[in-house]
Image (cartoon, helix red, strand yellow):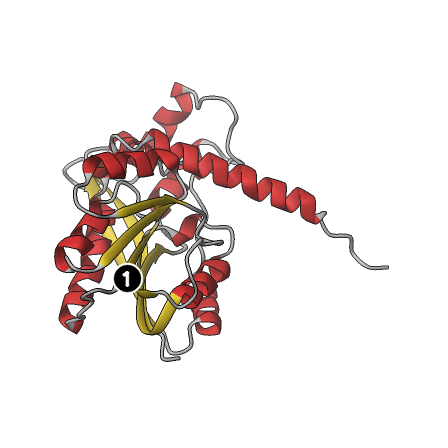
Amino acid sequence: MGIMSEPIETRLGASRTRKTDIARGFGNASGTYESASRLQRFMGNSMLQKLQAAELDLAEGQVLDLGCGTGWFTRKLQSLQPSAEITGIDLSPGMIRQASTSSEGTIDWLVADAEHLPVATGSQDLVFSNLMIQWCDDPRAVLRECRRVLRPGGWLVMSTLLDGTLAELKSAWQTADPGHQHVNRFETASDLQAKVENQLPGADLATRTIRLPYASPMALAAELRHLGAGFRGAGRRTAVTGPGRLRAMCGAYPREADGTVMASYEAAWIYWRKHR
């Protein structure tokens, strides 16, 4: 007897619900996102430096910022390639509204799903994607779409987070609230490597641990909230977390000698050029 799997309609419905939840969460944070995006700027700037070192000439070219958020790096890309045609895409209508009102020039803004891009095959010279793919149901679907929309010779530069991110926060919550998840799950480095190799032959994958300081665990929680990057897993509590559990989490979080705390982020960058 075979094992019965979950009906595809149920899986698709859950996926749509999760995407709607993610889009709403980031949209609600659109006004505070840029002020809280320390990690996002560090990782995106690393990719910009890589592009500048490669001395890409995208005059009259097509550039796609996938998961553009409020358009911070879309505008940076426009300043680096002023004659290129720049498009910013995000799942969140709220983010796209914020991006369009905060930007000048000729950037095109589009609400769309990274797993099903309304972009012509072989039309893009560069796809730039900063800390977006970890929110997608299937990274392979996004990588396939990036490969599809790139023209031969085009570049993909992408960043994401890996398993081990926010390990300190996860451990503190396990002590304070055992049996409930409070930190998003991320791909392991080996799983991501396998998926990248399968979809993007010859891609480079670079990894690094980034540690950022915070005044307190609550300051870290506030930054995640201002980013719209709160926990969205199935195991989250449906009610507001009580003050007792918050105090217990803060008490279990490891502190530095000066009373501050550190948060670890397991960062990964993908660099790939489409040869044919």
Please state, as top left, top right, bottom left or bottom right, where the C terminus lies in the image. bottom left
Determine the image quadrant of residue 146: bottom left
Label 1: few (<14), some (14–19) or many (≥20) C-alpha neighbours in 10 Å = many
From the top left corner, tell me how far across and down residue 209 is, in percent.
27, 58
Residue located 19% across and 34% down the image: 215
x then y, percent, for residue 58: 20, 67
The N terminus appears in which quarter of the rendering? bottom right
Query: Which residue shows up at 49% across the image and 41% down it?
Result: 19
What residue is shown at x 17% (from left), y 73% (from top)? 54
Position of residue 180 measured from the top left corner of the image (x, y, whole percent): 51, 35
Q: Amino acid at mark 1?
A: Gln
State the SS at label 1. strand
Asked whether 154 or 27 is in front, the reply is 154
Query: Residue 166 versus residue 34: which sits nearer the camera?
Result: 34
Does residue 61 appear left or right of residue 276 in this picture?
left
Q: Measured along the vertical axis of the image, is residue 115 above or below residue 172?
A: below
Q: Give residue 63's quadrant in the image.
A: bottom left
Residue carrying label 1: 62
Residue 241 in sight from this viewpoint = yes
**Residue 181 shows in the view:** no
Q: Residue 159: x, y in percent? A: 32, 58
Looking at the image, residue 6 sits to the left or right of residue 124; the answer is right
